[in-house]
Image: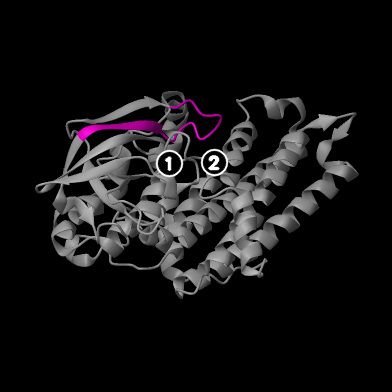
Amino acid sequence: MRRELFDQQHEEFRILVRDFIAREVIPHHGEWLVDGAVPRDLYRRLGDIGVMGLSIPEEYGGAGLDDYRYNVVLHEESARANVTLGTLRTHLDIVLPYMLKYADEEQRARWFPGLATGELYLAIAMTEPGGGSDLAGMKTAARLDGDEYVINGSKTFITGGELADLVVVVARTDDPIDGDRRSGLSLLVIETGTPGFVKGRRLDKLGLKVQDTVELYFDDARVPAANLLAEQGKAFTYLGHNLAQERLAIAVGAVAQSRSALEMTIDYVKNRKLFGTTVASMQNTKFEIGAMDAEIVAAQAMVDLGISRLIASDLSGADAARIKLFCTEMQGRVVDRCLQLHGGYGYILEYPIARLYADARVNRILGGTSEVMKSIVSKSLGL
């Protein structure tokens, strides 16, 4: 079905990104899979072509484009090429929006030029061991000592934490007010190299092998009070600001990766012969391919509507939850059926479908589990 989401500028950007991936990513992606992360210099090279500064205001060296469709193009072209650009989605879609909304003028002058060029890279540290989705139960604490905050605690499952130069840490700075655990949390930006701030081991994951995911530890780590984002004690409210975009971003990737899985499966069944004929000629294969394509097209329409709503600042939390729920569950079904059509070869890691299968599983967990999404949707229905 024809999409009407993009205009000429987005398609020109698509060509730029496609050429960059062909030149700078595809030849090296196999090495990155083995290494477990992309080289840090990748983000500087992306900065050279303007990708890192798309949404950074022009006065700080960016393009000043408040248009999420450029991010969508970036994700779609990565999926089309079946590559991963490390933790770029987390940096651009999840962490950078907090900086854009809550950084004061001094912080903007200090950080934004480096963010625009790719010299500075971001991560956010929310999840704690044993905490999961219960952000209100945060144990990491920060106390104000003069003009510095002293942070103690630990974080886990931190996407991009190894390569990040700046990490936005969610920490408890105040006691809960009237028993409300959501109060008293703050956002503090800590710089790599700060004494007492230790980056732990890289976690060995089932999928997403090119994305560094680590544990972080804070042992009397001192952060300047000037690194506090917005008001002390209001972080829980701030964290809700970007949840809709975060969940939509996951859905964007889920649909794009599903389309990639289907396309590689179509190529495979056209060439794979079994019982004297191609797998593609078998009726069951046609049924499966047709059903998957219909699901992907339906999910794409849902995502595109969500993108339009986001651009218009009209994407509700419930609608973002609906989109993420439907698209990630669809992705799970599609990549499973694509792997099945590959037969035994689908289980061999040299076939890209195996990696897509492993990578897809976490999307039903990231940004809130499918169960959390269902709860949000049901709450919006008055239940």
In the rendered image, residue 16, in percent from the top left (x then y), is placed at 39, 55
* 217 inside magenta stretch: yes
Front residue of 198 and 7: 198
Tell me which amino acid carries mark 2: Asn
Q: Quadrant of residue 105?
A: bottom left
How many angstroms separate mark 2 from mark 1 (CA)?
28 Å
Q: Nearer the viewer, mark 2 or mark 1?
A: 1
Q: How is the image coloured?
A: one colour
Compared across the picture, whether 296 is left or right of 182 comes to right
Compared with 274, 226 (above or below) is below
Q: Quadrant of residue 278?
A: top right
In the rendered image, residue 313, in percent from the top left (x then y), is placed at 45, 73
The disc, 2 or 1, on the residue closer to the chain's N-terminal end is 2
Q: Residues within 10 Å of mark 1 (few under 14, many from 20)?
A: many
The C terminus - image quarter? bottom right
Compared across the picture, whether 2 is left or right of 225 comes to right
Q: Which residue is mark 1?
A: 127
Q: Residues within 10 Å of mark 2 (few under 14, many from 20)?
A: some
Compared with 301, 287 (above or below) is above
- Residue at 46% in and 76% down: 312
- Residue at 60% in and 25% down: 350
In the rendered image, residue 249, in percent from the top left (x then y), is placed at 50, 55
- Residue at 59% in and 56% down: 324
In the rendered image, residue 122, in percent from the top left (x then y), is placed at 30, 46
Element marked by disc 2: loop
Q: Which residue is mark 2?
A: 82
Q: Which residues are magenta?
A: 203-220
* 143 inside magenta stretch: no
**Residue 293 visible:** yes
Element marked by disc 1: loop
Q: Are marks 2 and 1 in contact (CB under 8 Å)?
A: no
**Residue 259 visible:** no
